[in-house]
Image (cartoon, rainbow, N blue to C red):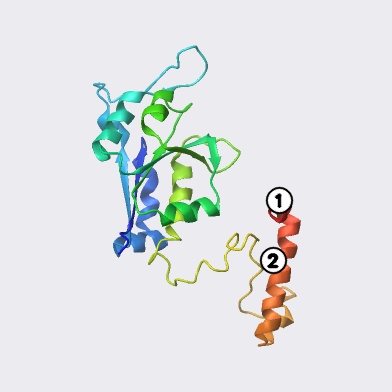
Amino acid sequence: MKSKMKISILTLFPECFDYFKISILGRAIDRSVFDVRVVDIREYSTDRHKKCDDTPYGGGTGMLLTAQPIYDCIQAIDSKHSALRIFLAPTGKVFDDIKARELASQNQEIILLCGHYEGVDQRILDLCMDQVLSIGDYILTGGELAALVVVDCVARYCSGVLGSEFSNIEESFANGLLEYPQYTRPQEFHGLKVPDVLLSGNHKMIAEWRSKTSLDLTKKNRPDLIR
């Protein structure tokens, strides 16, 4: 039997992850079908003031996370390197739905390292990390938001996290296209009506409408997916 997914998040700002106490993920964690551990890197600093950053060699603006606290933190929680270690940074390969499914299918713990300031000492990547992932072509003030995105996406593909095992089947990107428009009550709102086909009860016609509108929406908003 496959063990539950475990993700450890290494960060300087553990308070950012109160999100995991609420919502679908919070309930999944409470039911012990999914596990998230938030680890404060600062606790492993040997500096008497628990300092974890310094100026980069060669000059430049900003500060860089130093190697020692991160290295000792990783050694403390994964001394045998049994986990898949991922650094979250804009220099990595872009994280997408395919990658989320891949990570969810792996029967091992995942460690996510949140960068901050100007990043981390390169030697941490050379000594400790297996992969570098980016959630998009833009810059954040820290990797905490990226970690939230990755964990939320991966969790959706872990057995028992969602209310229904079929909840992911018709989501955007599940079949390579964006999801079709959806409607609920009332049938008319501010002059806009629910498409008649959705009220018809004809499941074949509804499926065809959903397929067409999904394709049309993808062509309009994400033509790169069509290519």
Earlier residue among tags 1 and 2: 2
Task: Please tell me how many numbered marks the rendered image carries.
Answer: 2
Coordinates of residue 215 in the picture (x, y in percent): 72, 64
The mark lying in front, picked from 1 and 2, is: 1
Coordinates of residue 216 in the picture (x, y in percent): 75, 64
Vertical position of residue 146 compared to residue 154: above or below: above
Q: Which amino acid does label 1 sit on?
A: Asp
**1 and 2 marks in contact (CB < 8 Å):** no
Residue sitting at the far bottom = 201
Q: Residues within 10 Å of mark 1 (few under 14, many from 20)?
A: few
Q: Quarter of the image for the N terminus: give it.
A: bottom left
Of the pair 87 and 26, the residue shown nearer to us: 87
Of the pair 190 and 31, the residue shown nearer to us: 31
Q: Which amino acid does label 2 sit on?
A: Ser
Residue drawn at (66%, 68%) of the image: 180
Judged left or right of residue 150, residue 124 is: left
Using the image, tell me which numbered label, if any, was put on residue 214.
2
Q: Can residue 39 be seen in this view?
A: yes
Q: Is mark 2 on a helix, strand or loop?
A: helix
Q: Is residue 189 visible?
A: no
Residue drawn at (32%, 62%) of the image: 33
Asked which quadrant contains residue 185, the reply is: bottom right
Vertical position of residue 181 compared to residue 108: above or below: below
Report which residue position mark 1 lands on: 224
Asked which quadrant contains residue 29, the reply is: bottom left
Q: What element carries label 1?
A: helix
Coordinates of residue 5 in the picture (x, y in percent): 35, 55
Q: How crowded is mark 2: few (under 14 residues within 10 Å), some or many (20 or more)?
A: some
Judged left or right of residue 205, residue 25 is: left
Vertical position of residue 80 compared to residue 117: above or below: below
Distance between mark 1 and mark 2 Cα atoms: 14 Å
Residue drawn at (73%, 82%) of the image: 196
